[in-house]
Image: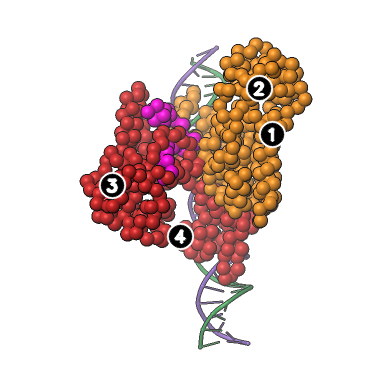
Chain colours: A orange, B red, C purple, D green
DNA sequence: GGGCAGCGATACCTTGAAGGTATGGAAACA
DNA sequence: TGTTTCCATACCTTCAAGGTATCGCTGCCC
């Protein structure tokens, strides 16, 4: 199968309409129809149910849609990584803005001190971006937080595990407490948990404010419009007007370093080694 | 990039010889030369150093070789999974012969009892085969053993953790012991640890016998030619003439169920769910 | 050092497949 | 029943993938 065929199939499978798919691909509809039926013939598999009224995916078609997306992603990542390898010898590390604390600084220092280390570009990005950057070949390595981030399809090493704390406005009644439980926080009227964007950039419906970065979250908390439960290391970089209270029954957060499963360059191996030795 | 270009590049990068690569690809040498230099021009990256005497990979070329192999694997897996989805609605589970004990039987029973379950074909294979089967799309799901098997690039759920025991001939002096340490086993003269094949099917050099399956291992141990450290669940299926002794400082073995990170079919999800509920 | 062998690049030609336009034909709908 | 919508077919054009012949460079050997 050629990537062109996969791109064509993905377009049709997503649009479920040959005309629109052809438009999106910038070709005419008849060659697209032909390409798809040729693909079906070569695979010996019917991928689409067509009538003159509607196009639907068959079961194997749905399988191919998922697999084709992954395969195309791999091809595009290959291209990007090759280009990056040619342009700069350095590594790109993707990290959440919220995690850009002590650990990251220590890691960068430790790695830079190694013999033969290469420059590391740090990309601070939103919570949903990192996986995409890594998967699509824009980044070589990322710091992720379990159990929130999915490490599906990556190689990982665990770096540290920490408890979580509630971040509250300094004036909040809970401020005097030495500990809290999740149920108290969720039941807390008037201080809803904010909503982060999903992978596709949209927000699930809910009462909390929609946020997209860490600074924004801190401001909302300071304004008394939200509360959050975050790893306890946020305390080292807490703005004025906010306090933290340990949450006993919040899950432990594990920071992991993650990289694509092939990609075993010397530079990457060195960075991972430095990370595990912290 | 088209998969054809990637295949051409991989062939040249592996052979480091345009003539031989062309032969392997079943085309003439000139079109291959042209295809590669066109790829280099389009990427804007020099992939190969050529002289009339030798061809070598550049640094970005080495990156593309790794990435291209992974991408081609993904494309081929897409094709195979689509074909399999069309032919049979069932799942293929890859398991080591050694792990085909209680856990597997319980899993299959539990899943078969679920409403809406599909037939599960079990492929019992050598230790290095499973990853390949899963990666290449011949299998949908596998039972792997941490820390021995690599789960790089897969989604996993942990199923169970167990201690390891030494498997010894019944006549061995250690048979009377209630526990052992790894150092005692490795220092044990005349009973070397057997060697399993690497991923590429070759064997690392070493003193132990080369083995490729579980039955063979058990026979070698019974013959007094080898010893092994295995998960304690082997005891339920131990042949005559062998005994086990717990090994205190051997790493715990975790059995995980692993599947490719996309591939979230209803059937697979059901099987994974059944596995986690065991 | 000159002839030679090995190997990649270039020149030039052929052909097949990718893509375009026009149109057919089935199905829903008014 | 006429109309619209939408996929498939027929037929043509073009471009790029692939083939053959050959050049040019570089070690190598007598």
Residue B190 at what x, y percent from top left? 32, 59
Output the chain of dot 3: B
Instruction: Please tell me which residue is depicted at 76% across the width and 22% down the height of the picture.
Output: A241
Image check: B109 left or right of A119?
A: left
User: In this figure, which residue is indicated by the disc labeled 2?
Assistant: A245
User: In this figure, which residue is indicated by the disc labeled 4?
Assistant: B24
Q: CA distance from mark 2 to mark 4?
A: 66 Å
Between circles 2 and 4, the one closer to the viewer is 2
Q: Which mark is residue B176?
A: 3
Specify which label sits upstream in the sequence, 4 or 3: 4
Check the picture and name the quadrant holding the C terminus of chain B. Answer: top left
Question: Could you tell me if the residues under marks 1 and 3 are in contact, i.e. CB atoms within 8 Å?
Answer: no
Output the chain of dot 1: A
Residue A30 at what x, y percent from top left? 53, 36
Looking at the rendering, the stretch of residues picked out in magenta corresponds to B250-278
Query: Does mark 3 fall on the same chain as mark 1?
Result: no
Residue B84 at what x, y percent from top left? 38, 38
**Residue A275 falls in which quadrant of the image?**
top right
């Amino acid at each position: 199968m050629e990537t062109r065929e996969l791109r064509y199939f993905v377009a049709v499978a997503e649009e479920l309409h040959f005309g629109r798919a052809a438009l999106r691909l910038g070709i005419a509809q008849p060659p697209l129809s032909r390409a798809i039926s040729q693909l079906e013939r070569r695979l010996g598999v019917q991928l689409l149910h067509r009538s003159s009224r509607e196009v639907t995916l068959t079961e194997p078609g749905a399988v191919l849609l998922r697999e084709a997306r992954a395969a195309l992603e791999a091809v595009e990542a290959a291209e990007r990584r090759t280009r990056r390898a040619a342009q700069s010898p350095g590594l790109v590390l993707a990290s959440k803005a919220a995690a850009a604390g002590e650990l990251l600084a220590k890691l960068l220092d430790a790695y830079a001190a190694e013999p033969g280390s290469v420059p590391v570009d740090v990309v601070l990005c939103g919570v949903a971006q990192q996986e995409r950057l890594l998967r699509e070949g824009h980044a070589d390595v990322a710091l992720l937080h379990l159990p929130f981030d999915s490490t599906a399809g990556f190689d990982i090493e665990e770096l540290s595990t920490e408890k979580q704390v509630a971040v509250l406005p300094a004036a909040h009644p809970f401020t005097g407490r030495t500990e809290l439980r999740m149920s108290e926080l969720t039941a807390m009227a008037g201080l809803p948990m904010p909503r982060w964007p999903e992978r596709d950039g949209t927000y699930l419906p809910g009462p909390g404010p929609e946020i997209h970065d860490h600074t924004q979250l801190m401001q909302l908390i300071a304004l008394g419009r939200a509360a959050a439960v975050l790893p306890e290391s946020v305390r080292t970089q807490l703005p004025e007007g906010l306090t933290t209270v340990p949450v006993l029954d919040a899950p432990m957060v594990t920071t992991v370093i993650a990289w694509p499963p092939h990609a075993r360059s010397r530079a990457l191996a060195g960075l991972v080694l430095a990370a595990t030795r912290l």
